Image: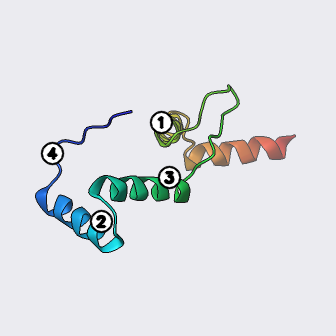
Amino acid sequence: MTIILDDIKPEILEELQNQATYHGRTLIEEIKFILTNEVKINRTNIRYNAWGKPVTKESIENTINEMKALRKNIAIDQSNIREMREQGRRF
């Protein structure tokens, strides 16, 4: 597989080359090493929701936003709470 990276800042490329030289690797070997270690460190287990769809940061944010919107639609003010308490006392 070939991966092409465009628009890498020259200072980043220079730092990568310096790290590669320090570690006795080529630039490509250094990039492979960094990517491999990052994947191992940040390995995530995919979790699924009740409908079998993968849970992602985006899906969590969408759900939170939907819950906030619902909260606005079904908000109960103080007068309603008082009325509910009084009705509960009647029974």
N-term mark: 1 or 4? 4
**Relative to 23, 5 lies left or right:** left
Considering the numbered disc 2 on the image, is that residue within a helix, a strand or a loop? helix
**Which residue in the protein does label 2 denote?**
20
Q: Whole-Å distance between the Cαs marked 1 and 4?
A: 32 Å
- In the rendered structure, are the residues bearing label 1 and label 4 in contact, judged by CB atoms less than 8 Å apart? no
Provide residue 6's location: percent of width, then percent of height: 18, 41
At label 2, which amino acid type do we have? Ala
Considering the numbered disc 1 on the image, is that residue within a helix, a strand or a loop? helix
**Which residue in the protein does label 4 denote?**
7
Q: Whole-Å distance between the Cαs marked 3 and 1?
A: 26 Å
Provide residue 4's location: percent of width, then percent of height: 25, 38
Considering the numbered disc 4 on the image, is that residue within a helix, a strand or a loop? loop
| Residue at position x 42%, y 58% in the image | 33
**Which residue in the protein does label 1 denote?**
62
Q: Disc 1 or disc 4, which is closer to the eye?
A: 4
**Which residue in the protein does label 3 denote?**
39
